[in-house]
């Protein structure tokens, strides 16, 4: 497990994480952003750094449905079944957003996309499998920052929909 630093949101965090910290406070989230010494860009990296199961990592993936960005917060143990998800929502097909489109939609880069703190609210799907974990970890705006939360809190703070996003 990597050593971590918990710092007050307005001090030493990267600017993107400060924005996320402000959004978390406004949403009345108790968990604070933690900056890790190494990358937590992938679910496996984050799980190793935190000493938790990969499934407890809420991986943030941005897709486009008819050019509209959709944020999918999936358990790190899953690969999103985009066909099944689009079909269950009765949406046009989902395509993975390119890095520049992710940054445009979220203000954050791939590997650090937080569930909130974006320029505008995004339609969000929260993987129902995240409910299997009493604590899940989501990105804090950069590839080295994370915060603890829960499935239900992710649904609440994003105004999202809890759905299965992959076959078990």
Image (cartoon, rainbow, N blue to C red):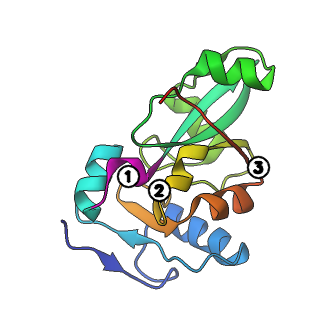
The crowd level at tag 2 (other Cα within 10 Å; few <14, some 14-19, many 20+) is many
| Distance from Cα at disc 3 to Cα at disc 2 | 17 Å
Asked whether 36 or 168 is in front, the reply is: 168
Dot 3 or dot 2: first in sequence order is: 3
Neighbours of disc 3 within 10 Å: few (<14), some (14-19), many (20+): few
Tell whether 56 sits left or right of 107: left
Q: Answer above or below: position of 9 versus 72.
A: below
Q: Residue at x 61, y 28 (%)?
A: 63
The Cα atoms of the two marked residues, 1 and 2, are separated by 7 Å
1 or 2: mark nearer the eye: 2
Residue 41 visible in the shown view:
no
Callout 1 touching callout 2 (CB < 8 Å): yes
Q: Label 1 neighbourhood size at 10 Å, few (<14), some (14-19), many (20+)?
A: many
Tag 2 secondary structure: strand
Q: Are the residues at dot 3 and dot 1 in contact (C-beta closer than 8 Å)?
A: no
Per the image, label 1 sits on a secondary structure element best described as loop
Q: Which residue carries the number 1 mark?
A: 143
Q: What's the distance in space between the residues labelled 3 and 1, CA to CA?
A: 21 Å
Q: Position of residue 139 (x, y in %)?
A: 47, 56
| Residue 89 as seen in the image, left or right of residue 71 | right
Chain part drawn in magenta? 52-58
For the point 40% across and 83% down, the residue is 7
| Residue at figure coordinates x 60%, y 45% from the top left | 128
Q: Is 122 on the left or on the right of 43, as rendered? A: right
84 or 31, which lies in front?
84
Res 26 → quadrant: bottom right
Q: Would you say residue 56 sits in the magenta stretch?
A: yes
């Amino acid at each position: 497990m990597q050593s971590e630093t918990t710092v007050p949101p307005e001090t030493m965090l990267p600017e993107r994480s400060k924005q996320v910290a402000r959004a978390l406070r406004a949403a009345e989230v108790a968990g604070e952003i933690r900056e890790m010494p190494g990358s937590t860009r992938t679910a496996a990296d984050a799980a190793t750094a935190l000493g938790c199961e990969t499934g407890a990592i809420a991986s943030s993936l941005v897709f486009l449905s008819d050019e509209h960005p959709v944020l999918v917060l999936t358990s790190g143990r899953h690969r999103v079944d985009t066909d099944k998800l689009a079909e269950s929502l009765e949406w046009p097909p989902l395509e993975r957003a390119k890095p520049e489109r992710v940054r445009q939609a979220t203000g954050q880069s791939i590997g650090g996309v937080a569930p909130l703190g974006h320029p505008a609210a995004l339609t969000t799907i929260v993987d129902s499998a995240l409910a299997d974990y009493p604590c899940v970890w989501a990105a804090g705006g950069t590839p080295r920052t994370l915060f603890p939360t829960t499935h239900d809190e992710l649904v609440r703070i994003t105004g999202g929909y809890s759905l299965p996003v992959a076959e078990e």
